[in-house]
Amino acid sequence: MNHNLNTSNRHEEILNQIRILRTKIGKDLLIFAHFYQNEDIVRFADFLGDSLQLANEASKNKDTPYIIFCAVSFMAEMARILCSEKQEVLSPDMHAHCPLADMADINVVEDAWRQISTIDRNITPIVYVNSTAELKAFCGKNNGAVCTSANIKKIFQWAFDKKSKIFFFPDENLGRNTAYSIGIKEDDIFVWEPQGHNNPKEIKNKKIVLWKGFCYVHTAFLPSQVEKLKDQYPGLKVIVHPECLPELCAISDYNGSTSFIKKTIEGSMPDSIWAIGTEWNFVNRIAKDNPDKKIFPLTDSICTQMSQITPEKLLFILEGIAAGEKRGRITINNDISYHAKIALNRMLEIV
Ligand code: SF4
């Protein structure tokens, strides 16, 4: 009991210290947070959004000296690439890596690209924003672009207007769901196995080559969960993220990015019932913000890497700024940053 009280007092004290330092640093700082952050971080965010919204905001803001980016590392890297050189981008935990992003290693992708482009040069590389800066730079160098789950359809259409094939990495499910949504059939898809043997000749008659990567948070949602809940709640609507399995997307009422999910639910009828297939923190916030609807997750699936950002770590970064230290400073090699920015700007220009 006393231990719980102490823990809760300590937690309140940390939140209070964050408030004090945040006020003291004032306009010199912006805190960005991804939708999947928990309430103890979100409450301090000056800007909360999905990857596309955060990228847009980072590209517009060129003056604020400090940006603390509360999310997994590839997002903080993206902000570093898009912000101006005089700004500092700081991460509360640089080791919070997205496992999906880590499923595509630059050397393995470059090797695959060499094999694929020997068979057919009429192909555009497209990288999901959930990727390392090196992969974004690779797309910048090879006339490709970055995409997010909010704009992937437009980016695919842009790529197909230029060339006949797409090489998409690292999320197979997002690639496949998008391919189906623009009329590409299973026979036109080739899955590249980064760990296995691939026969590049087989891509000759394909339209899209997908990297075999996945998000463990979104592949935890299954069609059987939908069936069970539909029996329990007549009239239930199901909305899921396109990183989910294609067989789940096929039986869901809607699929789309986190901002699409948010907008769809906010615009739905009072008393409607929703099961959502995306990260647990985000689903809980939507449920809280829409008390006139019944909203719950398809199953509880938490991104533990997003949860590595804690108030204690945020406070440590703020104390650094107040003391004139640059804790959690994100740096990226100039050449990588230059080419990654080309691919990111292409995305921002297309959408
Ligand atoms: S939810 Fe999935 S894709 Fe998003 S950061 Fe977590 S592991 Fe990566």
Image: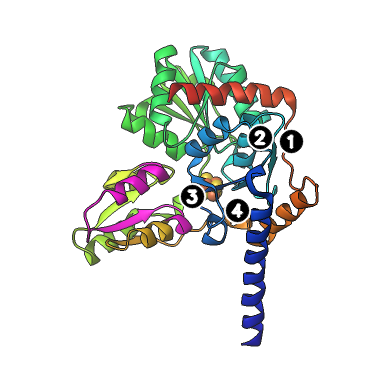
Q: Is residue 153 above or below residue 221?
A: above
Identify residue for label 3: 35
Pointer 3 or 1: first along the chain: 3
Mark 3 or mark 2, earlier in chain: 3
Q: For residue 331, which numbered disc appears in the image?
A: 1
Q: Quadrant of residue 256?
A: top left
Which residue lies at the image location 53% right of the left edge and 12% below the top edge? 121
**Real-space Cα separation, disc 1 to disc 4, in angstroms:** 20 Å
Quadrant of image for the N terminus: bottom right
Numbered tag placed on residue 80 in the rendering: 2
Q: Amino acid at mark 4?
A: Gln
Of the 4 image quadrants, the one containing the C terminus is top left
81 is within the stretch colored magenta:
no
Q: Amino acid at mark 3?
A: Phe
The answer to whether residue 333 is seen in the rendering is yes
How far is disc 3 from disc 1 in space, using C-alphas? 24 Å
Q: Does the residue tagged 2 have its C-beta within 8 Å of any atom of ligand 1?
A: no
Residue 249 placement: quadrant: top left
Distance from Cα at disc 3 to Cα at disc 2: 19 Å
Among the two numbered marks 1 and 4 on one chain, the one whose residue lies closer to the N terminus: 4
Front residue (pair 47, 160): 47
SS at badge 3 = loop
Q: Nearer the viewer, residue 18 or 25?
A: 25
**What x and y, as percent, mark residue 7?**
65, 76
In the image, residue 179 sits, relative to residue 100, either above or below, namely: above
Question: How many angstroms separate mark 4 from mark 3 (CA)?
Answer: 13 Å
The secondary element bearing badge 4 is classed as: loop
| Dot 4 beta carbon under 8 Å from ligand 1 | yes
Residue 249 left/right relative to 195:
left
> Residue 261, how many percent across, how many down?
36, 47
Disc 2 from disc 4: Cα separation: 19 Å
